[in-house]
Amino acid sequence: MLSLVTLIGAVYVAMAFSLSTSALPLDSYKFSTEKTSQDFRIAVGIRYGTSAFPLHPITSPNGFVFGEAEISKTAHNFTPVYSITETDIAAVVDTNLTVGYETCEIAKSEEETDIGGYHVELSLAEGEIWKNLGDLTDIFSADYGHVFPAYINGKKTLRIGAFPNYSEANAAAAAVATMLDGFKISVASPSSSGVCYLNSDYDTILFEYSGSDGFCSGVAAVQKENTDYSYLYYSQTSYLYDGVFCFKRYLSEGNEGLSMINLVEMQAYVEGVVPHEISSTWPLESLKAFSIMVRSFAMANLNHHYSAYGFDICCTSCCQVYQGRRLVTNSVIEAVEATKNQIMVHGNKIATASYSSSQGGYSVASQYAWGGTLDYLTNQPTPWEDYCDIKNGTWTAELTPEELAAQFKNAGYSSIQGNKIVEISYQTSDDSPYLYSFTGIDEKGNSATATRSARVKSLFGSYVRSANFTIAKGELTYKRTDVIENTIVNLKGTYTGEVSVYTDKGTVKGEISLLNFFTDIGKAIDDASAALFAKTKDGTAVLTASDVDIPVSTMPDANGYYTIVSNFGDFLIISEVRDIVDTIKAGDPDNYVLAGMGRGHGVGASQYGILHLAKAGATYDQIIRAYYVGTEIVNIGEFFK
């Protein structure tokens, strides 16, 4: 009989990762995610719901660190407990499994089981049980195949064998008991929180985990000193990821699998979002602005999916598109680092930085789109957005009366009983062109109304790109605005020299103190240096410190060009534009024709508008102020003091 005393001095040959110079200490993986921390972490759902598969193959170049992750509404922590040198493993459901060619599935019966979910379990009242792994492997692997460590409800155990039922595991436990002394021996059955890790051939169990509510299995990449940083590779997405993969059992009707959550530093998360929502080739100031927006959106939506799935935020466009390290460039890293820990706030709350692809020259307030008023998400013109020259920036469509009736019915408006919509009416969102309501009346006199721009957009489905459109029967004349050039004018500092102003009597020179300067919306500018504005018969003139006179017209000139001045207090956005008027005719006079601008919900910022401002020379804070009225940029740590 092999005694406990004999085993205590056994060499732990299976744990290649130790506290040595070749690898970082296990403590280096510990992190705190309190809101006051400058290194905040976020839990991102990668696979969940119907995509919570039973098997998740992952790769790491230097091996893996297993541990326990705590993901709750108030805590995000990872405690490492064990390491292996295997570079390819698979996380699977702790149950009976059937192994096929390059696949592993939940077994449909005990007869089809290749790896069972029942094991002989060994534990100790005190002492380091995992030090016995090497000797126990030598003794039992030939007969039982699997000898492996497990971390169960916060305690270390060792497990032997993989049996399809309790009876066979119990018989094996009795046999093991005759060969060992000093261990508590029992039978481990599959648990509702159990996660099993297999080798790449799916024939050897490497580690198992089971925990209580709020805790789940986590695995990180081994980080070796003096080498490049190692990431986790997930073959089902073909992406690399930073941080920790957390696996949580997901049980629902018709689906049993493992939810996969990426517990990751906020900086790495932002890096993983920016190049998938905008292009990493865009100007640095646009990347900086977007980094703050992404971080703010994430912080404002913590626990968004916690009740349903147990994580903060998803990885799709329903939240923000996150794909780990894919497409992350030096420019993205530079922008995220330059804005580290910066978020947008409005009053005492983090601002939800809503954004969409393009707006068509005007945003729509959150209450008109979804309901609920947020003062910084307002109706406002965005004339600097050159939507005429971007994909899906402008579009047209045509629907028959029958097709429009079908759209109402498919959207669930049961009051429409007829086969045709013969009359329509709509209202815009006050001073925004986005449709707030749309009413259709069928040939039987039944009517239905979609209210709020998000529902109007949804009602029309693939026929529209946004709710910023006009519609008419038979023929429609509509206007769109093309941007010729944008200029950013900073108004900080003072200037006391002589300037020249165009008037109806010619050019007048005078001291600034003797002139009354206005923007095109009538607000006086008292503090200026690089550029000033004076009201003249031709509109608003730009006055420069070098006495160069640049006439700016608010009425179309011979080329149809005119200027819109957007005033943000200490800077102006000067947009030189022209209007284009078109007419479209339906193929049948009874059909409806639509003409629209922009793509997306139109609330908050326009992604392409951010690009156009950055190209004009706007700084990242000016970009944010242009879209999110009354917000401030602050440090996370300072905000949560």
Image: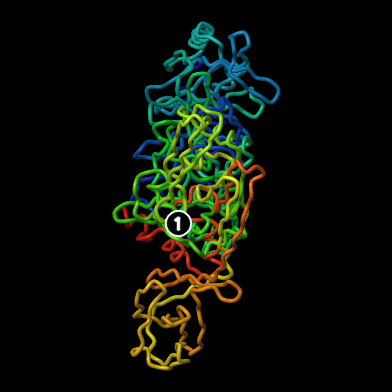
Closer to us: 365 or 351:
365
Closer to us: 316 or 226:
316
Image quadrant in which the C terminus is located: bottom left
Q: Residue 430 at x, y = what percent?
A: 39, 53
Q: Residue at x 51, y 12 (%)?
A: 176
Q: Residue at x 50, y 47 (%)?
A: 467
510 left or right, relative to 170: left
10 Å crowding of disc 1: few (<14), some (14-19), many (20+): many
Query: Which residue in the structure is indicated by mark 1?
Result: 292
Q: Amino acid at mark 1?
A: Ile
Query: Is residue 480 positioned above or below 369 on the image?
Result: below
Q: Residue at x 44, y 55 (%)?
A: 432
Check disc 1 and report its element: helix, strand or loop. Answer: helix
Closer to us: 344 or 378:
378
Q: Residue at x 49, y 47 (%)?
A: 601
586 left or right, relative to 546: right
Q: Residue 187 at x, y = what percent?
A: 46, 13
